[in-house]
């Protein structure tokens, strides 16, 4: 039998809200929903959802990121702006900070790219956020997806897929190295003896890799949870190895329960092979839900939501994620081998289309129909009464399709509020999800151990209290 809320440190099922720092939810058409609010440029928008999620005891609110406006389809951004197809993308650190100020237990996770940022900067930003929100931060490590992101960062094209992961390995080594370079008890703060911290408990990283170099010492002491939780969502062979090496929480996107179960098993095995504990690293699957008191009402609600999308949404988002202009080829003609090979974005999506369509050279139409990008059917969708939706989630959870869910909003805030108000109590009633937070940090609430401190470090001289307050102009006395 599957673990239950009262017997696991993480409290049963892991629940994450999939959020967007922009004008819509994952479902690009959601801003057109009659009940969607449009104050997405204010902190109140994010704080309102944060409070809803915390009241429902969600583990985490998570933001994805993209470092460019979708403009690969027809090599233009006009339609993106006109139709609001994820046209806005705000930086998520200030937003997570604002949400952290409005909550006390909810974890807050955000995506930063290993391809376009510098590791020292990422380490510092997330470590500072983690301190400001009391040990509730998480970093989703991504390698980014398309050329438009490269152009925004002064590069000519996006790095090839596997090279991105090689760089990302070094990137995480640097970030974790810095995060672990202050011992938990390094700070002394002895005013009388003028002893701020013990230099023997702070080390310099001196990292030199093929792609990256970073020296240190790092300037941010540890947070109550040691350091932010690492999230990863690699799905290719190389990506899964990366996820299994570093991920403390792993996001997946499965098309069906059957394929999900198979991939879940493989990923848990990959975690074991990497010497990790496959039980404590939770695998959570992206989904949509539409819930209402009666089945009929839920179907009606879903029809309204479905009716919001327009064809250009899908083509725009498909081109963006696969890094290929689907507008540059006839809609019903097979794409060439070289077109297929040039798709350098999310290759697992390309490969799924080949598998699902049964064609080595699918047409743009095949891509649109198989991926259902731009609709709320691009993730598994659960529609029904609270009990029907809970039945579906329970089946995935009980039969080891996943350890929990990344719940995407069909619209904001309604998508999250419906789930919190109707589905969560049903999951709690069934003993599948905890009723209270287990601790205050995200690690405690996910049932993760505190990370180990740096294993080996060149020891600096042990700190000595100053014998007397310095009166001469030695280096120690200078401001
Ligand atoms: C739930 C979820 C969220 C993701 N969020 C982002 C994101 O914010 N930015 C991004 O560039 N990629 C994101 N990805 C893509 C993954 O990082 C990864 O690139 C993708 O799953 C394909 O795997 P691969 O890189 O091994 O080919 C996400 C994937 C999933 C399943």
Image (spheres, grey):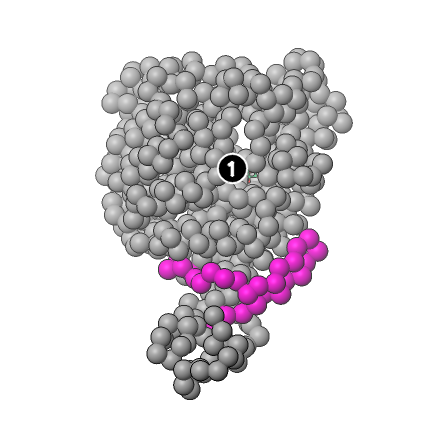
The residue that appears at 74% across and 22% down in the rendered structure is: 336
Residue at horizontal 26%, vertical 43%?
A: 431
Out of 332 and 459, give the one closest to the viewer.
459
Instruction: Report helix, strand or loop for mark 1.
Output: loop
Residue drawn 66% across and 55% down? Answer: 212
Q: Is residue 26 left or right of residue 418?
A: right
337 is higher (above) or lower (below) than 461? above
164 above or below 196? above
Q: Is residue 85 visible?
A: yes
Residue 159 horizontal side relative to residue 445, left or right: right
Quadrant containing ligand 1? top right
Give the left or right position of residue 216, taking residue 413 as reference: right
Q: Position of residue 124 (x, y in %)?
A: 50, 54
Q: Residue at x 39, y 37 (%)?
A: 17
Q: Nearer the viewer, residue 128 or 277?
A: 128
Quadrant in the rendering for residue 422: top left
User: Predominant secondary structure in magenta?
Assistant: loop
In the rendered image, residue 205 lying in the magenta stretch gets the answer yes
In magenta segment, residue 105 = no
Q: Is residue 239 visible?
A: no
Foreground: 198 or 209? 198
What's the magenta region?
201-226
Report which quarter residue 471 is drawn in.
bottom left
On whether ligand 1 comes within 8 Å of the CB at mark 1, the answer is yes
Q: Residues within 10 Å of mark 1 (few under 14, many from 20)?
A: many
Rendered view: 186 above or below 125? below
Q: Which residue is mark 1?
A: 65
* Residue 111 placement (x, y as % from top left): 50, 42
> Residue 341's quadrant in the figure?
top right
Q: Position of residue 233 (x, y in %)?
A: 53, 42
């Amino acid at each position: 039998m599957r673990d239950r809320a009262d017997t696991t440190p993480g409290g049963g099922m892991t629940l994450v809200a999939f959020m967007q720092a922009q004008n819509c939810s994952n479902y690009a058409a959601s801003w057109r929903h009659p009940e969607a609010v449009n104050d997405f440029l204010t902190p109140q928008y994010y704080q309102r959802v944060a409070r809803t999620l915390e009241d429902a005891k969600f583990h985490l609110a998570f933001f994805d990121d993209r470092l460019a406006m979708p403009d690969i389809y027809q090599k233009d951004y006009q339609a993106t702006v006109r139709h609001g197809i994820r046209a806005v993308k705000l930086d998520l650190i200030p937003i997570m900070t604002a949400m952290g100020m409005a909550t006390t237990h909810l974890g807050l996770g955000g995506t930063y790219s290993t391809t376009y940022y510098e590791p020292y900067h990422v380490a510092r930003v997330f470590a500072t956020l983690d301190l400001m929100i009391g040990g509730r931060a998480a970093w989703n490590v991504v390698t980014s997806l398309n050329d438009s992101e490269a152009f925004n960062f002064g590069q000519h094209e996006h790095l090839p897929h596997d090279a991105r992961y090689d760089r990302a390995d070094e990137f995480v080594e640097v970030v974790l190295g810095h995060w672990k370079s202050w011992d938990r008890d390094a700070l002394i703060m002895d005013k009388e003896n003028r002893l701020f911290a013990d230099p023997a408990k702070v080390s310099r990283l001196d990292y030199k890799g093929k792609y990256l170099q970073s020296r240190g010492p790092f300037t941010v002491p540890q947070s109550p949870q040691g350091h932010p939780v690492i999230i990863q969502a690699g799905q290719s062979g190389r990506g899964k190895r990366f996820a299994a090496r570093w991920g403390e929480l792993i996001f997946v996107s499965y098309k069906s329960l059957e394929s999900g179960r198979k991939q879940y098993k493989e990923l848990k095995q990959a975690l074991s092979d990497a010497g990790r504990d496959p039980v404590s690293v939770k695998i959570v699957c992206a989904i949509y839900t539409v819930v209402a008191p009666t089945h009929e009402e839920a179907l009606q609600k879903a029809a309204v939501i479905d009716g919001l999308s327009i064809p250009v949404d899908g083509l725009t988002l498909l081109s963006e994620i696969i890094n290929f202009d689907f507008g540059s080829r006839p809609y019903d003609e097979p794409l060439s081998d070289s077109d297929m090979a040039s798709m350098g974005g999310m290759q697992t999506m390309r490969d799924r289309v080949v598998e699902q369509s049964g064609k080595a050279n699918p047409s743009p139409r095949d891509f649109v129909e198989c991926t259902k990008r731009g609709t709320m059917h691009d993730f598994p969708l659960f529609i029904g009464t609270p009990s029907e939706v809970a039945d579906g989630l329970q089946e995935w959870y009980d039969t080891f399709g996943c350890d929990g869910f990344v719940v995407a909003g069909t619209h904001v805030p309604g998508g999250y509020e419906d789930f919190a108000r109707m589905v969560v109590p049903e999951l709690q009633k069934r003993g599948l999800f905890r009723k209270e937070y287990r601790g205050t940090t995200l690690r405690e609430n996910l049932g993760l151990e505190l990370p180990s401190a740096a294993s080996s470090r060149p020891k600096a001289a042990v700190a000595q209290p100053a014998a007397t307050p310095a009166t001469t102009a030695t280096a120690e006395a200078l401001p």
